[in-house]
Amino acid sequence: MSGAGVLFDAPGPRARRLSAILSWISGVVLLGLVAWGIMILNAPRESGGITLPGMFDPSRWEILADPEFWSFVIFTGVWNTLRAAIVAAVLAIALGVVLALLRSSPIGWIRIPTAIVIEFFRGMPVLLMMLFILLVAGTGQYWAVVAALAIYNGALIGEALRAGLASLPRGQREAALSVGMRPLQSKMLVEFPQAFRQMLPIIVAQLVVLLKDTSLGYIVGYQELLRVTLNNLGSFYGNRYLFTLWCVAFVLYLIMNLSLSWFARWLAKRGDRRFRPGKATPALDASQAILVTDATAEARGGETPR
């Protein structure tokens, strides 16, 4: 065994040469697939007896020079997407805090029904919840999207905060009680701020998922970015610009989601006291993080209400 490797031997010259050859072959195959896809998209096609130019023909991208196009996309599509995401995020965090406090209650008739409610909303698809709120509650499309996103993500955030409370060392609660605090005061003033700070990167990562899920508002008729580009502008400019509109929506979603993802990674590195430059902590989604935190709580001897 080599000093660098613990579970396996260091690769020899033949293994490294084989790995390099396979890497080059994979790169060539990948470049070939990309070139093939570009050729397919750029090939002229027949539609209704008319020959249309390829997807990358300049005539298909001329609408990008129209200021009214960008005005409608930014001030209607992007703004409606961010408006729904911001309001749903605030409501989801508030709901998550309430559910976390109820879920960690020592009183069984409060803790058990809360656990059932959390698991119910975690298991319900977001789109089904939007349709239910729109059809049964009679709200508009905006509040159907906001309420469904807030309830679903609030349940996930509440479970994450509950796991954060359970992972705290038992001495935190005992120290607070020893100085005369009541159990509720200990949880609100000592334990919960630490749990919220510990789970903040996971909460921000879940808010990234919330932003992406606003695209489900397309189904219920909400004027978010995807519906504005592919539906409204597609009908106005014609089907020949659908690929262009899809690319615009893709790039804008990518910019928003990558910005939030970068902020989540920065927050995770800043909040993790064990982080050292050059050795980043692997990112987990909400479900994985809850399982890891529960395991940490059991290892530390924390009280995890079941």
Image (tube, rainbow, N blue to C red):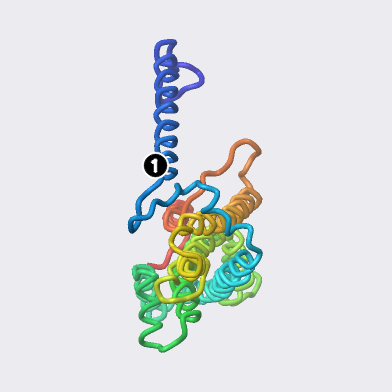
Q: Position of residue 230 (x, y in %)?
A: 46, 64
Q: Residue at x 39, y 51 (%)?
A: 51
170 and 88: which is toward the camera: 88
The residue to which callout 1 is attached is 40
In this picture, is 275 found above or below 216? above
Identify the residue at horizontal 52%, vertical 66% (top origin): 225
Residue 295 placement (x, y as % from top left): 43, 53
> Does residue 260 appear in this view?
no
Q: Is residue 109 above or below residue 9?
A: below
* Residue drawn 64% across the image and 50% down it: 266
Q: Secondary structure at mark 1?
A: helix
Q: Quadrant of residue 29?
A: top left
Residue 145: horizontal and vertical position, in percent?
Answer: 47, 76
Amino acid of disc 1: Ile
> Residue 53: x, y in percent?
45, 49
- The number of discs equals 1
Answer with left or right where residue 198 lies relative to residue 14.
right
Q: Tell me what residue is drawn at x 57 percent, y 53 percent.
A: 258
Q: Nearer the viewer, residue 97 or 64?
A: 64
Tell me the crowding category of disc 1: few under 14, some 14 to 19, or many 20 or more residues within 10 angstroms, Cα based.
few
Residue 84 lies left or right of residue 42; in this view the side is right
**Quarter the C terminus occupies:** bottom left
